[in-house]
Amino acid sequence: MIPHSTSARETNTLWRPYTQMKSAAPPLEAVRTSGSRIVLADGRELIDGIASWWTAVHGYNHPHIRAAVAAQLDTMPHVMFGGLTHAPAERLASRLAALAPGDLDHVFFTDSGSVAVEVALKMAAQMWLNRGIAGRSRFLAFRGGYHGDTMGAMSICDPEEGMHRRFGAYLPAQLFCDLPTDDATTEALERALSEHGDTLAAMIVEPLVQGAGGMVMHAPATLARVAEAARRHGLPLIADEIFTGFGRTGTLFACEQAGIVPDILCLSKALTGGTMALAATMARRCVFETFLSDDPSAALMHGPTFMANPLACAAANASLDLFETEPRLEQARTIENGLRDGLAGLRGLAGVADIRVLGAIGVVQFDRTPDLAALKARLIESGVWVRPFGDIVYLTPALTIAPDDLDRLCAAVTVAVRQTLDPSLGA
């Protein structure tokens, strides 16, 4: 029997994410959101610097998305997708196919980014089986990468530095390489593919930014080398744009900056503008067509209960409306300039290893992991909601954030970083 405790902390029925429940400080209670603001139960108002884990690209409670969800709620909040279809899903799939690069024309909806990745892995693996080719059971992923918390997704996260390294004994062994950023790493990738290519089902990459792995950025030329290596060895390329999709890097999809078309594309996070849970795994025609057969077992055997939830699809369609009618990509580029200027004062500071900015992503990297609890507390005290992790503090605000709020975010980070590096500076 599990020991039972009557302490207030240990009888809390909510088990929170990425949290040591024995020692963690109580969470802040949010009661209302609007624009780039989170209002707490005690009356404090925080500027959200990370758009609720990168989802709320239009800010919170955008009236157009709210109205679309309310209208859908009046007619059909949900219906199963097995054997049925509905207009919000049909419209959303068509619109995503029109927006995505190349012939990524086939859309499979799920309800989270991790599951979108799981479906991508299944698509790639079964594609070979449907062709009658066995033995391709592994995936090539890149060190520093992160692709989700479910078992298959965990297996392609960085095996040494990632949060899932404790699960190594439970996960299938995958092949890991460094991103091909120079001649040496490009040659190492080529050697790995030459030696192990016939065991691989696909390659997977986070285009331009390895998000939860530390907001590590690479040039479009690096992404192009990855795509070229996959093409040369006849491997499908999976692009995990769960973080980078929908304007975060300054283009609608990060892949556009390298001029590549992945064979499979994973989307989530900002897909519904941060309103509802929804994800999509998109496949090129050449992938989809390998599943067309007179053999029922050749079908893709996956089907989440809430697949293509009409409320979520309505929110996503409304979010795409806003990308069409409001200047989101221009706003991302404006934020990029604001982040460069706002964080520039930390560049070269002793204890700061790097300052990097891409689109609406700004990162301050320490030369060692700081006292994260103290850093978080300083940021909250300054009126901003930012969640540093590892050796970085980063900003990924809503694309609609007001210039004054962006300035306050950058100023708060600047002061908090300086105080972290030199506590004598005081509160």
Image: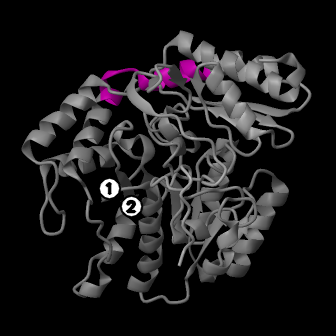
Few, some or many residues within 10 Å of mark 1 (<14, 14–19, 20+): some
Query: Which amino acid, mark 1?
Result: Asp
- Outermost residue to the left: 75
Residue farthest along the front direction in this orientation: 6
Where is residue 295 shown, x and y percent of the image?
Answer: 25, 88
> Left or right: 369 with respect to 73?
right
Q: Quadrant of the C terminus?
A: top right
In the rendered image, residue 99, in percent from the top left (x then y), is placed at: 35, 42
Q: Are marks 2 and 1 in contact (CB under 8 Å)?
A: yes
Q: x%, y% of residue 261? A: 48, 53
In terms of secondary structure, where does tag 1 sit?
Answer: loop
Q: How many marks?
A: 2
Question: Which residue is found at the position 48% from the left and 21% from the top?
Answer: 330
Q: Is residue 372 left or right of residue 298?
A: right
What residue type is disc 2 on?
Ala
Q: Vertically, is 198 above or below 409? A: below
State the extent of the magenta-drawn residues as a range. 322-337
Q: Residue furthest top?
A: 404
Check disc 1 and report the residue beneath it. Answer: 105
Which secondary structure class fits the magenta region best?
helix
Q: Is residue 400 above or below residue 365?
A: above
Judged left or right of residue 209, residue 12 is left
Image location (x, y in percent) of residue 154? 58, 66
Residue 40 visible? The answer is yes
Q: Residue sitting at 69 percent across and 15 percent down? A: 411
Query: Which residue sits at x=32%, y=77%?
Result: 301
Question: Which of the labelled discs sits on residue 283, or is there none?
Answer: 2
Question: Could you tell me which residue is drawn at 37 percent across and 53 percent down?
Answer: 279
Camera-nearest residue between 135 and 414: 414
Mark toward the start of the polypeptide (2 vs 1)? 1
Considering only vertical position in the picture, is 292 above or below 47?
below
Which element is circle 2 on? strand
